[in-house]
Image (tube, helix red, strand yellow):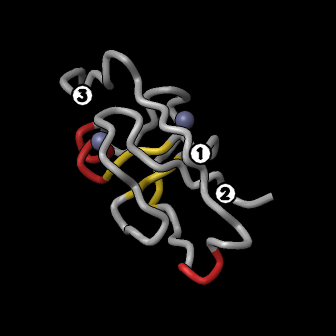
Amino acid sequence: MSLLMKPCCECCGTATLPEATNALICSFECTFCKKCAALMNSVCPNCRGTLVARPTRAAHLLDRHPVSTKREVKSNGCDANEV
Ligand SMILES: [Zn+2]
Ligand SMILES: [Zn+2]
């Protein structure tokens, strides 16, 4: 099994491309962009787990190991104002 590599931030829908370094994930692969993760103090709003920088996937591996294209964005976003 490889990482799902979700295509966008669950909060704001910002694209988190496989080669981009702006994505953070928790252990359940909830995916957030750097900006939202910072607002949430690097804590996943879904499971309260720690968000860490997602590793990138090299472009030459994407053919054999394609990333997820299913966009999952919370309808009401993440409550980034809650501290
Ligand atoms: Zn975001
Ligand atoms: Zn999570």
Pointer 1: residues within 10 angstroms few (<14), some, or many (20+)? Answer: some
Residue tagged 1: 29
Q: Nearer the viewer, residue 43 or 76?
A: 76
Task: Determine whether 55 is above or below 15 in the image.
Answer: below
Q: Secondary structure at mark 1?
A: loop
- List the single residue furthest toward the front: 63
**Amino acid at pointer 1:** Glu
The location of residue 51, given as percent across then percent down, is 46, 48
**Amino acid at pointer 3:** Ala
* Mark number displayed over residue 3: 2
Label 1 close to label 2 by CB (< 8 Å)? yes
Image quadrant in which you'd find residue 17: bottom left
**Ligand 1 quadrant in view:** top left
The location of residue 53, given as percent across then percent down, is 45, 61
Residue at image location 46% in from the left, 36% down from the top: 44
The location of residue 55, given as percent across then percent down, is 52, 69
Q: Earlier in the sequence, mark 2 or mark 3?
A: 2
Q: Earlier in the sequence, mark 1 or mark 2?
A: 2
Residue tagged 3: 80
Task: Determine whether 47 is above or below 65 in the image.
Answer: above
* Mark number displayed over residue 57: none
Pointer 3: residues within 10 angstroms few (<14), some, or many (20+)? Answer: some
The location of residue 29, given as percent across then percent down, is 59, 45
CB of mark 1 near ligand 2 (< 8 Å): yes
Residue at image location 24% in from the left, 21% down from the top: 82
Q: Quadrant of the N terminus?
A: bottom right
Q: Secondary structure at mark 3?
A: loop
Q: Quadrant of the C terminus?
A: top left
The Cα–Cα distance between marks 3 and 1, rounded to whole angstroms, is 19 Å
- List the single residue furthest toward the bottom: 60
The Cα–Cα distance between marks 1 and 2, rounded to whole angstroms, is 7 Å
Q: Secondary structure at mark 2?
A: loop
